[in-house]
Image: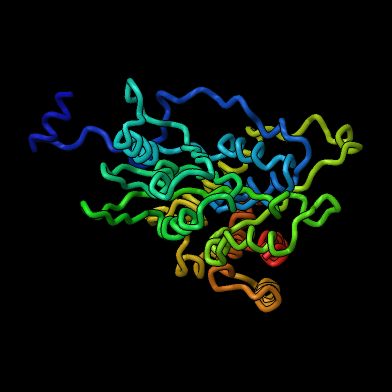
Amino acid sequence: ISGLTRHFEGEGTAPFSAEGQSVSRNREAGYDVDFADVKGQAGVKRALEIAAAGGHNLLMIGPPGAGKTMLAQRMPTILPDMDSAESLEVTKIYSIAGMLGRGGALIARRPFRAPHHTASYVSLAGGGRQPSPGEITLAHNGVLFLDELPEFQRKSLEVLRQPLEEGRINISRAGGAYTYPSAFLLLASMNPCPCGHYGTEKCRCAQHEIDRYLEKISGPLLDRIDIQSEVTGVDYEDIDKISAAAETSAQIKARVERARDIQRERFKNLEVRCNAQMPSPLIEAFCVLGSAGRKLMRQAFDSMGLSMRAYHKILKIARTVADLEGESAIGVTHLAEAVSYRGLDRKYW
């Protein structure tokens, strides 16, 4: 305390700096859910691993009961641990919002916010008569999970566009303008149609009903979602065939942490923490392709009608896939996997 007093009286330097430090005290208890609980869904688990490793946004599309929410709830178990700087940022936000709780210990676990689809625009964006952070800011340095994505109000979804690009949200009200940090990983899920059984004999939705349902998700918002993954149901006869020795969250998280270590070294002294945050100049520096890779990307760009944003997102995903494999160069197989995560918008929209 005496050191802090001298610091604020201008007689000394700050006794502690959070930069680069790890959070080792007041760590919260472990999770009571695990990826090993999920039967099958190897493809979606892989997509979630890549999303966690590179900070990429992810959309899951599939019928009711396929496991979308169950998978999303386990995402925090594989996220990399926060360092002290991130922990302080999150703790300050929750303190301002009056949600820190008694004791005021540093928040060590990455936030996981899952607002209901009836949430208002203000509750998501923040602001109000007494300005306070919304769900978008409360998810800073963590995950914002939007279940039943098309059921959210269109206005509420469109407010996501700025923070997804800039990592902050600007709010203008009669009482003034406010800027809140909002660098989060967007994790969303949805059915392929109102009844959820699109493409099967169970589906009774008229085409205009399907179109109206899907149109709630705008093209610009879809373009900002890096990974699209289809979640399919598990057949009854395959249940017993699925190995009981499924990978645990700890095993997946170990790979995620190794990939993040590579990124921390890559982006040291830069205001970037993960591959998903790379601006164009860094993409050109760290996502260099060979001749075979350039040929594949040209084919994908022309055949899929990719925007420049989508093109860059594929390169960043491929960079993350290479990091998970411990490869310094992006190969064709890394690119091919990245491209495979960008096709569902063409299937459904």
Q: Position of residue 262 (x, y in %)?
A: 53, 50
Hey, which quadrant is residue 83 in on the image? top left
Image height of 254 relative to 181, above or below: above
Visible in this render: residue 339?
A: no
Q: Is residue 238 left or right of residue 260?
A: right
Visible in this render: residue 263?
A: yes
Check the image and name the residue furthest to the top: 103
Q: Is residue 295 left or right of residue 18?
A: right
The coloring applied to the image is rainbow
* Picture residue at 51% right of the left edge, 70% below the top: 284
- Between 47 and 284, the one nearer to me in the picture: 47
Image height of 191 relative to 243, above or below: below
Q: Is residue 221 left or right of residue 91?
A: right
* Picture residue at 39% right of the left edge, 41% below the top: 86
* Picture residue at 34% right of the left edge, 43% below the top: 133
Q: Position of residue 265 (x, y in %)?
A: 47, 51
Q: Position of residue 257 (x, y in %)?
A: 56, 41
Image height of 131 relative to 215, above or below: above
Q: Is residue 196 left or right of residue 272?
A: right
- Between 50 and 342, the one nearer to me in the picture: 342
Q: Position of residue 227 (x, y in %)?
A: 62, 56
Quarter of the image where the C terminus is located = bottom right
* Picture residue at 77% right of the left edge, 50% below the top: 197
Quarter of the image where the N terminus is located = top left
